[in-house]
Image (cartoon, grey):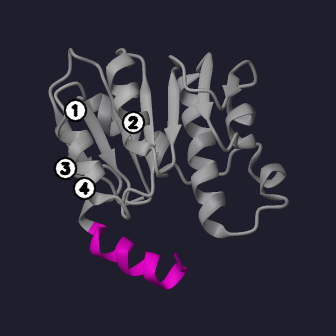
Amino acid sequence: MNRLRYFFIWLSRITHSRGFGIQSPGDYSFVRYVVNEHWPYYKYEELAVGQEDWLSQKLGRLYFRLANWRQPAVIVDAGRSPYWKAGCRHAIVTAELQPADIIKVHPTANTRQTISSVLDNADENTLLIIENIWQEKALWKKVIQDPRTTVSFDLFLCGLVTFDKKREKRNYIINF
């Protein structure tokens, strides 16, 4: 995706910026201080060395902030982004699908099976990240309509899904 196209998408989602319209204090602070945090973190410059494009750097910084905020014990990521370990040094990053605190899924041929497995085994502490939901709109709709999911965040480039059964089902569109 090129920057010009992303700019027009960002512009069309401008009414969903910085947590506007989110009534839950927890969800608002998550969007405001984790998802849309713009202050530079201590590892950004070090991790940016060798990054080939702006999109992988933008998503990598989000993963860094998620790991820093969540402090997970286990992270499932087939790409094994270095941003995870920078955000949480004690986390175990693995490519093998297993119960974990954060699970990142990139759409491939067997994505539906992988997501189905995650939905079956997720608990209230699991955070599911699905990349490229703008390419897989039908899959994203199916995931957010699933009764096992609760709060979800549509960031256009990726989707974040939680499974806390104490929460009311809600999907937020976020201008990321």
Of the residues under marks 4 and 1, which one precedes in the sequence? 1
Instruction: Give the residues drawn in magenta, as a range.
Output: 1-14
Of the residues under marks 2 and 1, which one precedes in the sequence? 1
**Mark toward the viewer: 3 or 4:** 4
**Mark toward the viewer: 2 or 3:** 2
Q: Who's the residue at 58% across and 20% down the image?
A: 72
**Which residue position holds label 3?**
21
| Label disc, if present, on residue 123 of the rendered structure | none
**Which residue position holds label 4?**
138
Q: Please tell me in which quadrant of the rendered image residue 126 appears.
A: top left
Say whether residue 161 is left or right of residue 20: right
**Which residue position holds label 2?**
113
Label 3 crowd bin: few (<14), some (14–19), many (20+), radius 10 Å: few
Q: Is residue 7 magenta?
A: yes
**Which residue position holds label 1?**
24
Label 1 crowd bin: few (<14), some (14–19), many (20+), radius 10 Å: few
Q: Pinpoint residue 172: horizontal percent, then vertical percent.
A: 24, 47
Label 2 crowd bin: few (<14), some (14–19), many (20+), radius 10 Å: few
Up the image or down, 47 lies above or below 156; here it is above
Q: Pinpoint residue 26: horizontal percent, then vertical percent.
A: 32, 29
Q: Who's the residue at 30% across and 49% down the image?
A: 19
Please report contact status of discs 4 and 2: CB closer than 8 Å, yes or no: no
Question: Mark 3 to mark 4: distance in Å?
Answer: 25 Å
Q: Who's the residue at 67% across and 51% down the image?
A: 40
Most extreme residue toward the bottom is 4
Question: Mark 2 to mark 1: distance in Å?
Answer: 32 Å
Question: Mark 4 to mark 2: distance in Å?
Answer: 15 Å
**Mark toward the viewer: 4 or 1:** 4
Which type of secondary structure does the marked residue at label 2 adopt?
Answer: helix
The reply to whether residue 39 is visible in this rendering is no
Of the residues under marks 2 and 3, which one precedes in the sequence? 3
Q: Who's the residue at 66% across and 59% down the image?
A: 57
